[in-house]
Every structure is written in C-alpha cells, then in structure tokens.
Amino acid sequence: MESKRIATLTLDDGRSIELPILSGTLGPDVLDLHNLAKLGLFTYDPAFFSTASCSSKITFIDGDAGLLYYRGYPIEQLAQKSDFLEVCYLLLNGELPDAAQKEEFRSLITHHTMVHDQLARFFNGFRRDAHPMAVMVGVVGALSAFYHDSLDINNSGHREISAHRLLAKVPTIAAMTHKYNIGEPFVYPKNKFSYVENFMYMMFATPAEDYVPNPVLVRALERIFILHADHEQNASTSTVRLAGSSGANPFACVASGIAALWGPAHGGANEAALKMLEEIGDVARVKDYVQGVKDKKYKLMGFGHRVYKNMDPRASVMRQTCYEVLKELDLANNKLFELAMELEKTALSDPYFIERKLYPNVDFYSGIVLRAIGIPTNMFTVIFALARTIGWVSQWNEMIADADHKIGRPRQLYMGETKRDYVPMEKR
C-alpha cells in the first residue's frame, strides 16, 4: 500500500500543520489545503494560477509538453478520426460509443434541434444590430422558461435530458441569432443533415436559394467544433461550475459561460487575430510589423498561449485544415489569406519568436477558416460558444454528480479600511 505523502508547513510563530500531497493520474502533484482553516489561514492566489479548483476526469492539458486529451484521447486523433457528436458522447459519458450507441445518440440530438416556436419571438426584443453574443446570453438563459419539466439537478435523468437539449438547440439558436442580425428569416433544421451540416444549412440557406453543404467546409467546421469542445478549467468553464455549484439550472449555467466567453481575453482571440491581419493590410508590411512586435509597438495576436508553453496541439490540426479550405475555395492568392501565410512563415523562421516559443495557436488559423467559410467576424465567438457547450455541460454534470460538491466560495485578502464609526453629515 502506498504510504501517505505529506508536506509540513511551519509558521514563524512555531505552529505547523501537515498538508497531504495528492496525485492525479496525469499532471503535477497538488497540496490539499483544507486543513489550513485549522490555523485560521487561507491561501492568496490571484486568478487561481496555482490552484486546482476541482478534481475532474474529463480533460487533461500539459502546457509544457503541448498535450490536450479528452477522456485520455489525444486531441489530434479525435480531430482527424472522429466526428463532433462522437466527441460529445465521449465527453458526456466517459467512453467512445459503439455503433448502436452512436446512432441512438445522433438520432436523439438530431430530432431535438427544433426550439419552441414562442422562443423565436424573444428575438424581436433585441435591436437588429445587437451583438450576436448579447442575444445568445439572453436566449440560451431563457430556455429554462420553456423546458422546465426536467430541471431537477439531483435527478441524473433530468440532467441528461437537459444536456441533450442544450447540445441540440444551441446551434439552432446560434443560426437564428445570425439570421436576425442580418435581417433574413429563420431557417429551420432538417433531420437529413448531420449536426455540422445542419448548422451550416441554418446559417446560409434562404427561402430563395437552398444550401448544399460542401464536404470540405463541413469537415473544417467539424474540426473547429472538436478542437474547441473543452479546455479544462478555463474562465468560462469555471464560471459554469461556480454558477452550477449554487444549484442554478443548466440553461442559466451555460448562459453564464457564454457571458464569460464573450470577454475579448477569452473567446475573442480569433477575431483579434483577424483584425490584426486587416490592420497589417498588405504582405509588404509583414516584416515591418514583425519588427514592430519586437520593438513592443504592436501586439502579435494569435501567437503563443496562456497555457501552452510549446506548440498548441490544436494548431497543427487547424493549420492543415486551413490549407485544405483555402485550396478548396481557391483562396490561396486571396490578399488576406496570403498575408496570414506570410506572417506565419516569417514568425516561424524568426529566432525572436522561436526562442520565446511564440508559435501560431489555434485561434490564428480558426479565424482564417471561419472567414473563408463565410461566417462573419461578429459570429466567431458564437461559434466558440456553440462548440464549447458540450464541455460546459459535461463539466457541470460531473460536478453535480459528485456527492462532495459544495457551493463555491472563494476567499479574499482584504486591503480596505479597518473599523470606523459613522460620521454625521454635518461633521464631514
């Protein structure tokens, strides 16, 4: 039997306490700090850089080695060999489905993509020029008002139904958000299409002209969905878990995740990368811009990553996909895409970026692919939210199913005024 491992913390007043050292199946060991409360202490860790907020079996990241696993499966294998609904089943249930399970799951999701007709009227309450993410937060949050028959979070059957509803209906809502924004009528889903085909159909079809999905573009968007399906305890996932810890319904929790993702430091990276390319404007300016980055005059968007200190494992898959899409659409000589490829080439061969491991990340390529497919820039973060819904739901479900889960309650280091007495108005 493995002996118990501990670390001993000794304070300057002579008091000490033993802190158990816990080991996961992968990743670094962690210190269990529960017992610090016995000394009247807690830790100070801004932005939780060194804090494990939960235990999880869903996603593993090793930023130094450039690894991303869903339930133990490398992201590269899933992106190349799997499809999005199979990955959804894996994240939600812990194992890859067999043929019968996959078909049952596919059929279940496909036949629940419609939304309540009254929900469509919600859109009329928004301005036509409202940002799509503002609409997404409101409409997804409103789902609980329409599907309140399965909101007992302590009932595993209810949680499963809610998970399926979110997975099925968020693409429909996302496409409706786009149509509302551009002033076109809503396009309803068709059961003959796959999950990704259906979304593209609802995005691009019109009453005047049907939409025939291009297999290369469908596969490209499928990979984007897979690559963004989950990413451990990021800001939006942590938000979903924290909201869920209070007992909030899953629709409200996912809406909170969408709100957190909306922040430009989180879900807006591919949009920022594309905006940077537009600001550069021409291939002839790439070298000057790169020099400006070195001189701290400009920021290089879409390069490097907060977690990955090596190559983002998703980026190599997205890079290949990017080239496939550009070739399919004959856009290799398109000014913007030509500029992107020149920037990539310059940065990857420059010692400044190599030494700092500032490699192109998934956002650099995904923005290019989304633009090529025809998705407008203001919908980029919506696409991210659509893909991440399954991760949020899986993380929420895992937390609620944990018998030891408690409402989240971070502490603080108070730096304000000490106690003082109220001063009457006439004496101020």
Image (cartoon, rainbow, N blue to C red):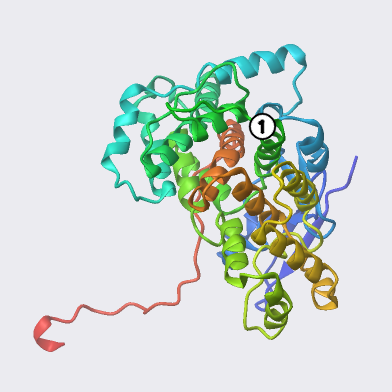
Identify whether 241 is placed above or below 363.
Answer: above
Left or right, residue 123 beside residue 201: left
- What is the quadrant of the C terminus in the image? bottom left
Where residue 365 appears, x then y in whole percent? 70, 54
Camera-nearest residue between 422 and 410: 410
Identify whether 111 is placed above or below 400.
Answer: above
Camera-nearest residue between 50 and 90: 90
Residue position marked by numbered label 1 in the rendering = 214
Where residue 279 appears, x then y in whole percent? 57, 70
- What is the quadrant of the N terminus in the image? top right
- The answer to whether residue 38 is seen in the rendering is no
Left or right, residue 15 beside residue 41: right
Query: Which residue sits at x=73%, y=41%?
Result: 328
Kind of residue at disc 1: Asn
Location of residue 386 (image quadrant): top right
- Of all residues, the one furthest to the bottom in this rendering is 427
Left or right, residue 60 beside residue 65: left
